[in-house]
Image: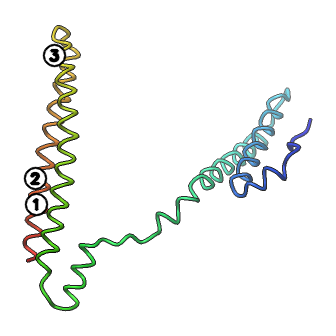
Amino acid sequence: MRMVPDNVFEILEQGFIGLAFLLAFLAYKLLSAEQKKEKSSSERLELISNFMKFSLVLCVMAIGSPHIPALLEEKTNPLMEHMLESAKNRTPMDKGFIEKQIEMLIAGHESRLKELSQQRLSVEQKVTATAHDSSDKYGYNRSLSRIEQYVRQENRELDRKIRDLRSML
């Protein structure tokens, strides 16, 4: 019985993910060969299990590794940059910049409220469609109250952020 596939070099040409796949495949082959034996060694099964865990960790790393540079990339926050520049120069922040930030906050807020409004409308339609089934109606009413809670929370957060921005003037 062959343990290694014929196209090992083709698999390894895929790089780290190819190596991870090959190690996971070998762990599978070792485990299946050990299971076919009439008497399996518990030590050998433990070693194969550890090898398989190592292979799975490598698979996760291989899948996640392309995303690491994007996570480490420094994304600048224009508001923070403007605040640092203002503090460094010991000048007040530009009123136009702050007003623009407030407009952006309000636009994002209105977009989220529109989504929540659409969700609310959808749930209300389900409530009217299931007027006779009390168990479904209870679930839909809970969804409605959660949506209303999200709307109140969004409004509070917007008010707080606008207050914070205006206090910088």
Of marks 3 and 2, the one in the foreground: 3
* Residue 128 - label: 3
Q: Residue furthest top?
A: 132
User: Which quadrant does the N terminus fall into?
Assistant: top right
Closer to the camera, 72 or 110? 110
User: In the rendered structure, are the residues bearing label 1 and label 2 in contact, judged by CB atoms less than 8 Å apart?
Assistant: yes
Above-or-below relation of 165 to 39: below
The local crowd at label 1, few if under 14, some if 14 to 19, many if 20 or more residues have their Cα within 10 Å, is few
The disc labelled 1 sits on which kind of residue? Arg
Between the C-alphas of marks 1 and 3, the distance is 36 Å
Above-or-below relation of 129 to 13: above
User: In the rendered structure, are the residues bearing label 1 and label 3 in contact, judged by CB atoms less than 8 Å apart?
Assistant: no
Residue under the point 20% across and 14% down: 129
The local crowd at label 3, few if under 14, some if 14 to 19, many if 20 or more residues have their Cα within 10 Å, is few
* Residue 156 - label: 2
Quickly name the residue at label 1.
Answer: 160
The disc labelled 2 sits on which kind of residue? Arg
Measured as percent of width and height from the top left, residue 7 is found at 85, 46
Measured as percent of width and height from the top left, residue 153 is found at 14, 47
Q: Dot 1 lies on which element?
A: helix
